Image (cartoon, rainbow, N blue to C red):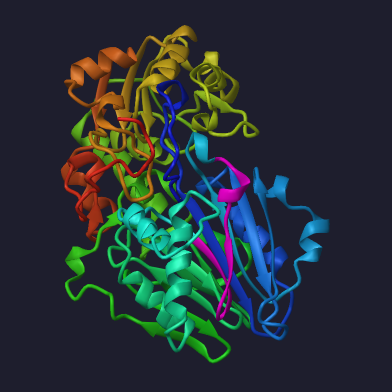
């Protein structure tokens, strides 16, 4: 995800859910075959990470060095691309991107991949994450005459890579030099005329992995995209590592990797919500993590009830875990309209609230007269949760006990997850009983903080949105573009 450094938006434009991040996907066919259609399917598998814009850039490693073709636009992958425009994207090396942004930054100019023509040639870049020092780096470049075409931090990264490439012997050395200036979260795919380069920040906030299918290599945010294109998982890109894919193989540079791995800080919310359940991140299965979260909720916050239900789709695995541990039957309470985007994409509060009912409908016969345990992954502002609780009670549920498979959000995020400022978070400054009352539930419980370390099998993680313990000093001004 790239944040918009100029965006301002009012309270009526904010939403009740969590903003997605972005997804990146790159491919290099060493046999020289056109690759755009494969990248299309890879992006399709990452659609959950970004639903507002997408793009694909391609190049022919056997053709002219300055010939990058790109197609991008607003909308879902299958709305932006068709057989005709995919057919025009000729080349065997490619990088693609799906993006989610906040309200004011939803413009085609901010869609990725970004393509730069510069002194040494061309490069295309796709980025997932947020930099905390982007404003500082942008101003530094502007003072030297740089003119920006977008308002996103990804362009700052691209400019720094291009600037470093003038003096660096190779493209990967330029990426490494640029990384030394970057602070924050970034998983990058950079396409140079003859190489595909992947880079992950030293904290490892966002996932990135390598795959292989025959003589084609891939870089992508999630392993599920490799499954979609029939590729084998090779390995994860390590936090701080730069990998270079060429016909000679995979080259690795780990100069920026922390010598002490305990300093790493993977986003714990990848395991709770962002990643697709069938993804495996740094060796840990996301589905298993969510099952665990549900089991922990049942152990720590039991309740007498008749049925456990999940709020689709993200609440379902944790609901299954709760049912397994508690012995309360797991059931289906909601029918989801799969053709409606996630609620937070709606730009106005009135549209967003009505979209909850467009998106979900309650199975009245399933819940009538029953005590329901309703599992969801999080509560941000409380608007959506309250409406769903009301829907269950209006359908005849006797009681609704809400269980959340994450701790309460208390602090904003600066690393690629758009958790808003404290005053917009329903849990901030409220007791558990007050939150429970605000969402109109009979009881409410969150996942305990000490359970987080068990979700990803002990890997170091970032939980700043829950704890306020930021692995990097937060910026002094709000880089996320929100007022206040």
Q: Nearer the viewer, residue 138 or 330?
A: 138
Q: Residue 276's x, y, as percent?
A: 48, 50
Please provide percent x and percent y for residue 283: 36, 65
Residue drawn at point x = 49 percent, y = 31 percent: 344
Q: Is residue 36 above or below residue 401?
A: below
Residue at screen point 24% across, 27% down: 445
- As drawn, the residue found furthest toward the right would be 84
Tell me if 109 is positioned left or right of 408 in this view.
Answer: right
Q: Is residue 196 left or right of residue 6?
A: right
Camera-side residue: 350 or 153?
153
Q: Which residues are magenta?
A: 106-126
| In the rendered image, the vertical position of residue 168 relative to residue 10, given as above or below | below
Please tell me whether residue 181 is drawn above or below residue 470 in the rendered image: below
Residue at 60% in and 83% down? 194
Q: Is residue 471 above or below residue 367?
A: below
Residue found farthest to the bottom: 248
Q: In the picture, which quadrant includes the C terminus? A: top left
**Residue 362 visible, this orientation:** no
Where in the figure is residue 311, as x and y percent of width and height? 45, 30
**Residue 454: percent from left, percent from top:** 23, 52
Task: In this rendered view, identify the residue nearer to me: 274 or 89.
Answer: 89
51 horizontally vs 32: left or right: left
**Residue 118 lies within the magenta run:** yes
């Amino acid at each position: 995800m790239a944040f918009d450094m100029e965006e301002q938006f009012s309270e009526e434009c904010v939403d009740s859910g969590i903003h997605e991040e972005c997804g990146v996907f790159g491919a290099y066919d060493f046999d020289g075959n056109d690759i755009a259609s494969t990248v299309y399917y890879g992006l399709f598998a990452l659609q959950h990470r970004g639903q507002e814009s997408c793009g694909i850039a391609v190049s022919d490693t056997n053709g002219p060095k300055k010939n990058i073709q790109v197609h991008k636009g607003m909308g879902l992958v299958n709305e932006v691309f068709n057989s005709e425009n995919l057919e025009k994207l000729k080349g065997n090396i490619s990088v693609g991107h799906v993006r989610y942004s906040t309200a004011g930054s939803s413009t085609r100019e901010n869609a990725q991949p970004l393509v730069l023509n510069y002194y040494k040639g061309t490069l295309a870049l796709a980025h997932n994450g947020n930099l905390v020092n982007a404003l500082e780096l942008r101003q530094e470049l502007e003072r030297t005459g740089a003119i920006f075409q977008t308002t996103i931090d990804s362009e700052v990264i691209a400019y720094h890579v291009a600037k470093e490439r003038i003096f660096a012997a190779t493209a990967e050395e330029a990426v490494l030099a640029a990384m030394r200036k970057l602070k924050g979260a970034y998983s990058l795919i950079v396409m140079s005329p003859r190489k595909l380069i992947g880079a992950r920040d030293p904290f490892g906030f966002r996932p990135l992995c390598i795959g292989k299918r025959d003589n084609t290599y891939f870089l992508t945010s999630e392993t599920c995209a490799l499954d979609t294109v029939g590729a084998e998982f090779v390995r994860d890109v390590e936090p701080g590592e730069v990998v270079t894919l060429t016909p000679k193989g995979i080259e690795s540079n780990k100069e920026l990797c922390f010598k002490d791995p305990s300093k790493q800080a993977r986003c714990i919310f990848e395991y709770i919500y962002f990643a697709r359940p069938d993804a495996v991140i740094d060796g840990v299965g996301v589905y298993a993590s969510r099952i665990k979260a549900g089991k922990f909720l049942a152990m720590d916050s039991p309740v007498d009830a008749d049925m456990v239900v999940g709020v689709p789709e993200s609440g379902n695995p944790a609901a299954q875990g709760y049912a397994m541990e508690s012995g309360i039957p797991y059931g289906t309470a909601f029918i989801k309209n799969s053709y409606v985007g996630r609620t937070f994409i709606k730009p106005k509060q009135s549209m967003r609230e009505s979209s909850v009912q467009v998106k979900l409908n309650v199975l009245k016969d399933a819940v009538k007269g029953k005590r329901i345990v309703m599992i969801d992954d999080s509560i941000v502002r409380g608007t959506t949760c309250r409406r769903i609780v009301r829907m269950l009670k209006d359908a005849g549920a006797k009681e609704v006990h809400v269980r959340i498979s994450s701790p309460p959000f208390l602090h904003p995020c600066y690393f690629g997850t758009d958790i808003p400022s404290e005053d917009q978070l329903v849990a901030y400054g409220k007791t558990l009983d007050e939150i429970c009352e605000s969402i109109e539930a009979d009881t409410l419980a969150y996942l305990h903080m000490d359970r987080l370390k068990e979700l990803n099998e002990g890997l170091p993680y970032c939980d700043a949105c829950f704890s306020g313990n930021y692995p990097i000093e937060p910026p002094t001004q709000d880089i996320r573009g929100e007022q206040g």
